[in-house]
Image (spheres, coloured by chain):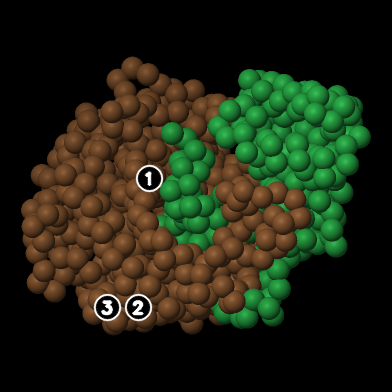
Chain colours: A green, B brown
Amino acid sequence: MDRRQALRTSTQILGGLLAVPGLGILTGFGAYDPHDHHHTQAVPSKPANTTPLAPQTLTEAQNERLIALTERIIPSSDTPGAKEAEVNKYIDRILSLWMKEDEKDQFLAALERIEQVALHQFGRPITKLLPNEQDELLKRYARAGSGADGQFFNTLKSLTLEGYYTSEIGATQELQYSAAHGAYIADAPLSQIGRAWA
Amino acid sequence: MFQKSNIPNIYVSTQTEYDAIVVGSGITGGWAAKELTEKGLNVLMLERGNYLAHKKDYVTEHKSPWDFPFRGRGDRKKFEEEYEVQSTCYAFYEGTEHMFVNDKNHPYIQNPEKPFWWIRGYHLGGRSLMWGRQCYRWGEQDFEANAKDGYGVDWPIRYRDIAPWYDYVERFVGISGEALGLPQVPDGIFQKPMDMNVVEKHVKTGIEKNFPDRKMTIGRCANLTETIGDRSPCHYCGPCERGCSTGSSFSSQSSTLPAAFKTGRLAIRANSIVQSVLFDEQKGRASGVQVIDARSKETRIYKSKIIFLCASTIGSTAILLNSKSRTFPNGLANGSETLGHYLMDHHFQLGASAKFPEFNDRYYAGKRPNGIYIPRFRNLNGEQRSDFVRGYGYQGGGGRSSWKRGNDLEEFGLALKTKLREPGDWGFSLMGFGETLPLHENRIWLDPQKTDQWGIPMLHIEAAWSDNEVKMRRDILTAAAEMIEAAGGKEVSTFDNGSIPGHGIHEMGTARMGKDPKTSVLNGWNQAHEVPNLFVTDGAAMASSACQNPSITYMALTARACHYVVEKMKRNEL
């Protein structure tokens, strides 16, 4: 079992609570989420925008569809959503450079299949659906269980959350992001601190 | 001084004889260099990896998640192919991969039945840059343990021998923490402790009320809360393992190396792999080291009066095993045939956790690089358990879960976004760290045929837990759960993710100290019984493992050994 898998398993055991791996050596991060290595921020550094302008793996149609779906998972509200945070570009990078071939193929196949489902159910492509229709489609996937559709939904959702909350928009506008905080405030009313730390 | 001296690959004449050579630049190498140069010796430090300059080379320090192409995941293919072992380390990720050794280029041989995960950093400063910084003194029970239960050989020293040296190094390192008056983790020279958060305080009260023999305290850590020289108090940015420009987190770079540079008596050669220590048969002494340039693969010889091996537990012993002579055909200073044996670590990766949602109106700010500690309470004060000898401690902490819990929630869309804007439930967890016994069969040795790209024999490492560790683990789970339950935790659950030797990164032993040259490699001064000018002051010297994080003990032993050397040299006795 690799480390990430091990951590994930332990997180599941704990109900997604906290596993505090390697605490011993590190202790440090208390009960922070074990996956979270991004406790830091800067000293405002220029975001390294290495994101390519055009997607590397997704076709233009797939890219538009992905933008529509991720935006329904994290919609814009009083803060920007997944689209403005360019979650699609992050997912394209993961598809292009991180996933194994079979994982990528599965994801892309499911991204095609969901379009067929939309066409069949609503007679229109995903990008032409109303938000509530897109939600209906996603809900169906969310309830799909452990099959291919359910797996696709879980992957799509987790990549969307990761891409969004680790983006500058997600971390600094939706949540809050303190660089070197300067001090450790051990206890304060939540109302005073406000939102969750990214 | 330090900045000015940051010149990689300073030319060092091979003709020069140094007063001392220090092999390795990690936490003990840094101390040896500081102490020996400050006492007037000319020192050559040899580091097998690259030069890594303080501040300038902390290339990911204070970067934001969005600065990383894979947001911390790293290049999966590269990690799988080149960092198979390193990627199991909690501190290894996209922001720190450059701090860890490339397993593919620096292989060792494991026994699949008895795996050992060897976590390494080959660069100036070694693991002092990525270490966990938890610092607990060992107590009398730790130095007496071998003599009492018969595992391993008796330590030639006792707490009183090392206590003043703990004082000495702690003043310089800067340890924040709380005095408890507990003999099993003696109090030291502490800076003001970091604060516990609201749930940690609540759990502490619950545990101490219900278990009078147990105490919970904030971690004692080498992160400053008060200024020392040009090192500032911690600014709570979080990941110390990326390097700490303010020197708030102790490392060779921030602390011991600048002190050594200041004397003008330290030369450093990076990319210099020590292949062996040379032995002068006539004089019965070490005469220098043979080095292979990591890049050109040229061989050089450096001579010195004294040799300090500080190349890490396994690194130092591997050098000795590869130092063969007529007198020592099986490795230098290995008349006892114990060199390479009695490898230890701490077993961990198990404990308990629970939720404390009644505190959900409270929160915190800043990323504290520290957690809580519950010192050992087993087999002390006359208790003698029938199921295991020795003991364990817990590390842990409280906090609120992040947006990642969204993956476990049903919903998506605005409802999810709104929910994740708030932190999740409070949780608290404890993880045990247990002592492991020194066993002959847990060992390292050199392959008789296979060599690495520098022609140095490949290293075999194998280790497995004994029945004592297995039984101790049961108690670790039970005691963790009972404490968290007593403290009022909801949904208490235990976890045991299994613990592979080496993964604790507290590897110790293989060139142990002892009273008898027939059964040990080093005497009570970290000096080889059989080679008077050879010292090993890293984890290799340990005769038992205790259950406390060991680095502060290595530092104290190193400073003590340096003092001994210089006193002996003054009297012409070395």
> Which of these two is toward me, B437 or B557?
B437
Q: Residue placed at 75% from the left, 46% from the top?
A: A73
Q: Residue placed at 40% from the left, 21% from the top?
A: B451
Give the CA separation, mark 2 to mark 1: 26 Å
- Residue B78 left/right relative to B182: right
- Residue B101 left/right relative to B235: left
Residue beneath disc 2: B206
Circles 2 and 3, Cβ within 8 Å, touching? The answer is yes
Residue beneath disc 1: B497
Q: Measured from the top left, where is residue B64 in percent x and y?
A: 73, 54
As displayed, is residue B138 above or below residue A107? below
| Parent chain of label 1 | B
Which amino acid type is shown beneath numbered disc 1? Answer: Asn
Q: Measured from the top left, where is residue B509 in percent x and y?
A: 27, 47
Give the CA separation, mark 3 to mark 1: 28 Å
Q: Is residue A136 visible in this depiction of the protein?
A: yes
| Parent chain of label 3 | B
Dot in front, 2 or 1: 2
The kind of secondary structure element at disc 1 is: loop
- Residue A154 left/right relative to B210: right
Q: Are marks 2 and 3 on the same chain?
A: yes
Q: Measured from the top left, where is residue B464 in percent x and y?
A: 25, 38
Residue beneath disc 3: B210
Circle 2 crowding by C-alpha within 10 Å: few under 14, some 14–19, many from 20: some
Which amino acid type is shown beneath numbered disc 3? Answer: Asn
Which amino acid type is shown beneath numbered disc 2? Answer: Gly
> Which of these two is toward me, B289 or A107?
A107
As displayed, is residue B243 above or below residue B288? below
Q: Is residue B266 visible in this depiction of the protein?
A: no
